[in-house]
Image (cartoon, grey):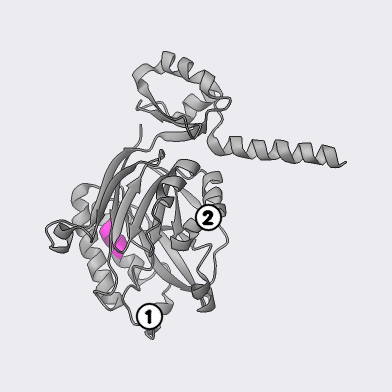
Amino acid sequence: MIRARLLSVAFPGGGFGSVDANRDKMVEYLEQAGAYRPDFVVFPEVARELGVPQEDESRKGEAIPGPMTDAIGAVARKHGTHAVLGMKERAGGRTFNASVLIGRDGQVIGVYHKVQPTVNEMEGGTVPGTETPTWETDCGRVGMCICFDLKFPEVAMMLARAGARIVFFSSMFHGGMRHAAWARDYGVFLVVSQSQEAVIVDMCGQRLAWQGHQEPLVRQGALRPFAFADVNADCKAYHLDFNQGKLGDIEAKYGSGVRFSILRPEATFVMESLIDDVRVEEIEREFGLEDLWTYYDRARKVREDMLGDINR
């Protein structure tokens, strides 16, 4: 079992007006989030630049590491949490739409560049990224995606193949039912931070937490714009094909130490280890399970080989 305390912030644009004001508000929210003892705190896409006038030179971004990551990193270190920060990165005379993963020590672990910016972004000079890096943390392997990426299955496939279990989705648009589809179809927890809403979805596509500025109590200041969930990240998604006959044997050995969430209409399931010293990968290897994307890619390979034989 691997506990992960996930907190997403609905961080509105337009109300602060400068990079300095945005930074100060994010620091304030991160300080407040510390009371939840989070493992990850997530902010929206371009949180650094939200509400800053278009003509302001600061909208082109700044270096990473830099003043913004230093400020957020100091608070992350104080509370022993990871932070995910959306911002423009300026590097080598180019601007990227970036998400930054900051570690519990306050240092930058890694940076993701939005693979699929919008047409307007690219015409405005934002350079697309080409990779979806993932990083191993004490809560499992994590990755990131940004806004328009959610429309492109190739981004999700790259993350799934890279072994991401938790994906931090920082965005300007909401995403709607795509949240559940991504989480279920690609086998990830999806942590959504958008300016108006914060959402956390599990691997079965079930919404675990929601909070947003549509809520009157948030607008009144009585509630914070935080979505929070305490999850077991020691789980993984599988297809029922070639696996379902083994589930009874797994339960016979491990009993209440494992939990299966079977999605029969979708023909998939999630296996979760509830045992402190037995990881889900160990159970997978012991019983010869094939995880979701290994199976899909094997099916692709069999198809390619068969077509190759036919066309010879």
Question: Is residue 189 highlighted in magenta?
Answer: no
Q: Mark 2 or mark 1: name the one nearer the start of the chain.
A: 1
Work out whether residue 136 can be spotted. Answer: no
With respect to residue 190, does 254 lie above or below? above
> 156 left or right of 231?
right
Give percent across and percent down for residue 5.
29, 44
**Could you say which is closer to the camera, residue 14 or residue 131?**
14
With respect to residue 74, does 94 lie above or below? below
The reply to whether discs 2 and 1 touch (Cβ–Cβ < 8 Å) is no
Q: CA distance from mark 2 to mark 1?
A: 26 Å
Work out whether residue 183 can be spotted. Answer: yes
Q: Which residue is drawn at the image coordinates 44% and 55% (left, top)? A: 144
Q: Quadrant of the C terminus?
A: top right
**Could you say which is closer to the camera, residue 90 or residue 187?**
187
Q: Main secondary structure of the magenta part?
A: helix
Give percent across and percent down for residue 278.
41, 26
Residue ID for mark 2: 132
Residue sitting at the far front: 265
Q: Which residue is drawn at the image coordinates 27% and 76% (left, top)? A: 20
Helix, strand, or loop for circle 2? loop
Residue sitting at the far top: 252
Q: Residues within 10 Å of mark 1 (few under 14, many from 20)?
A: some
| Chain part drawn in magenta | 72-76
Residue sitting at the far right: 312
Task: Report which quarter residue 102 is drawn in.
Answer: bottom left
With respect to residue 173, does 244 lie above or below? above
Amino acid type at mark 2: Thr
Residue ID for mark 1: 58
Q: Which residue is drawn at the image coordinates 17% and 63% (left, top)? A: 219
Give percent across and percent down for residue 284.
51, 27
